[in-house]
Image (cartoon, rainbow, N blue to C red):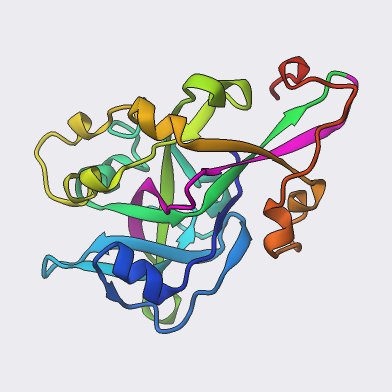
Amino acid sequence: MCGRYATTRSSGELSALFESSDDTDGRIGPDHNVAPTDPVPLVRVTPEGHRSLCVGRWGLLPHWSRSAAGAARMINARVETVATSRAYAGAFARRRCLVPADGWYEWVRHPEGGRQAYYMTPTDGSVLALAGIWSVWGSGADTRLTFSVLTTAALGELAEVHDRMPVLLPPERWSSWLGPTEEPDRLLVPPAADQLAGLEIRPVGPAVGDVRNDGPQLIARVPLAPTVAPQELTLF
């Protein structure tokens, strides 16, 4: 998974969808071009046991990190190593979260040069819940809630766009992902075929490549170059 996604629903809508309290304090708004270290909504379980919609920064910082400089390199955690990695294992065992998204972006390189951006999103407009892990870093005024998105090997047609994809959790798996378990590895199962079949792989324009750009025009479908068929595109 590359480092961009979209999340545009209001905190009120998200808290209703995820049956959570809204603890964002009005700090989130629509973002069609989320980039590493951006503040975005996530859902976690509080020590009191209820779901909380809160704001986290994309790029997990383990509590022992000496600085926040490495956050942009910690946006994704691989399912193959998340349970054993020093940086991620503790969060995976005890601090899992849901990351609401409308869709995510990937880029494919043309054989003759240049890149084509794609936006993966549910065809029915429903929300995606990306599997995440979170950590609290810092102290005092510089305390930060940070998170990473879990990725796995891409499946089906998604593998034609990129070799990795986020771990997608359907609503029936939200509770088990957020809840306590002595065997978190059992939670790392591939998405169901019907969930993958419900995703659109939409070609979009190059503007999403600039983190300064935002707005619904970024997710608008564009025609593919007539001289290049989709199957002729190559991965990074």
**Residue beneath the point at 54% across and 44% down:** 121
If the image is split into quadrants, where does the N terminus sit? top right
Q: Position of residue 30 (x, y in %)?
A: 57, 69
What residue is at 29 percent from the left and 31 percent from the top?
84
Depth order, front residue of 116/149 = 116
Compared to residue 58, the image places residue 41 above or below, namely below
Please state if 118 lies on the left or on the right of 185 as rendered.
Answer: right
* Residue at x 56% of width, y 59% of height: 37
| Residue 139 spot, x, y in % from top left | 37, 74
On the image, the x and y values in percent for residue 105 come to 62, 43
Q: Is residue 38 above or below residue 200?
A: below
Residue 98 belongs to magenta span: no
Q: Residue furthest top?
A: 232
Viewer-proximal residue among 109 and 8 = 8
Q: Main secondary structure of the magenta part?
A: strand
Q: Which quadrant of the figure contains the C terminus?
A: top right
Which one is in front, 23 or 65?
Answer: 23
Q: Is residue 195 above or below residue 80?
A: below
Q: Is residue 12 left or right of residue 27?
A: left
Which of the 4 quarters of the picture holds residue 218?
bottom right
Taking the image as drawn, is residue 85 in sight? Answer: yes
Magenta highlight on residue 121: yes
Task: Specify the segment rendered in magenta.
Answer: 112-136
